[in-house]
Image (cartoon, rainbow, N blue to C red):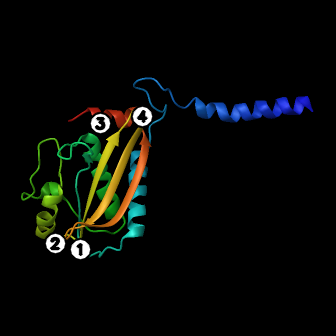
Amino acid sequence: MKRRQCLALACLAAVALPGCAQFYYGDAAGPLWNTNLIDANYRAIDKMLEQATLDPSQPVLVATLVHIDRLTESSRLGRVFSEHLAGRLTQRGVRTTELKLRDKLLMHRDQGELMLSREVREVSQTHNAQAVLVGTYAATMPTLYVSLKLVHPSGNTVMAAYDYALPMDENVRSLLVSQN
């Protein structure tokens, strides 16, 4: 009987310990692998489209994700995430308008297409948009938190929302640190 218990404990340790070894809890290291950001962002759009019914003939605008504490600032991470989100909307048959090609939208250098609530109505009316996808992110040592909302331009009514968290790996960290 004792031998069976030892064998069971050894098997349990063999299964449990590799999961513990996946993270280094030091100052700058995160998981030993890079999170697939594209899959995470595509999954977010898929979940949002389950919540909202969109008219395929009307465009959706995608704003650059911004830092939760500084709504006028973004990073490479915010711009890259917005590209993933817009791409997935297009793949799912939602008409998206490429804001970078429009001269009417105020673009801050190195910030992307920032969409503050006071700008939503004006820009969406100009582009006859049925909705605007906006989002924020916040970073902690172990985790990046992302919140997305699909907002109806008139009245700023939230049509769909999705929140997700990603491990703060070197891939995510490098997108946050580099501003270019």
Residue on which disc 1 sits:
58
CA–CA distance between discs 4 and 2? 39 Å
Residue 164 to residue 11: above or below:
below
Quadrant of the snapshot with the N terminus: top right
CA–CA distance between discs 1 and 2? 7 Å
Q: Earlier in the sequence, mark 1 or mark 2?
A: 1
Q: Residue at x 6, y 59 (%)?
A: 104
CA–CA distance between discs 4 and 1? 37 Å
Category of crowding for the residue at label 3, using alpha-carbon neighbours closer than 10 angstroms: few (below 14), some (14–19), many (at least 20): some
Answer yes or no: do the residues labelled 4 and 2 have beta carbons within 8 Å? no
Amino acid type, mark 2: Asn
Label 2: element kind:
loop
Residue on which disc 4 sits:
169
Q: Earlier in the sequence, mark 1 or mark 3?
A: 1
Amino acid type, mark 4: Asp
Q: Earlier in the sequence, mark 4 or mark 2?
A: 2
Residue on which disc 2 sits:
128
Amino acid type, mark 1: Gln
Answer yes or no: do the residues labelled 1 and 2 have beta carbons within 8 Å? yes
Category of crowding for the residue at label 2, using alpha-carbon neighbours closer than 10 angstroms: few (below 14), some (14–19), many (at least 20): some
- Residue 52: x and y in percent read 36, 70
Amino acid type, mark 3: Leu
CA–CA distance between discs 3 and 4? 11 Å
Quadrant of the image occupied by residue 131: bottom left
Q: Earlier in the sequence, mark 3 or mark 4?
A: 4
Residue 51 to residue 86: above or below:
below
CA–CA distance between discs 1 and 3? 33 Å
Q: Residue at x 42, y 46 (%)?
A: 165
Q: Earlier in the sequence, mark 3 or mark 2?
A: 2
Answer yes or no: do the residues labelled 1 and 3 have beta carbons within 8 Å? no
Residue on which disc 3 sits:
176
Quadrant of the image occupied by residue 169: top left
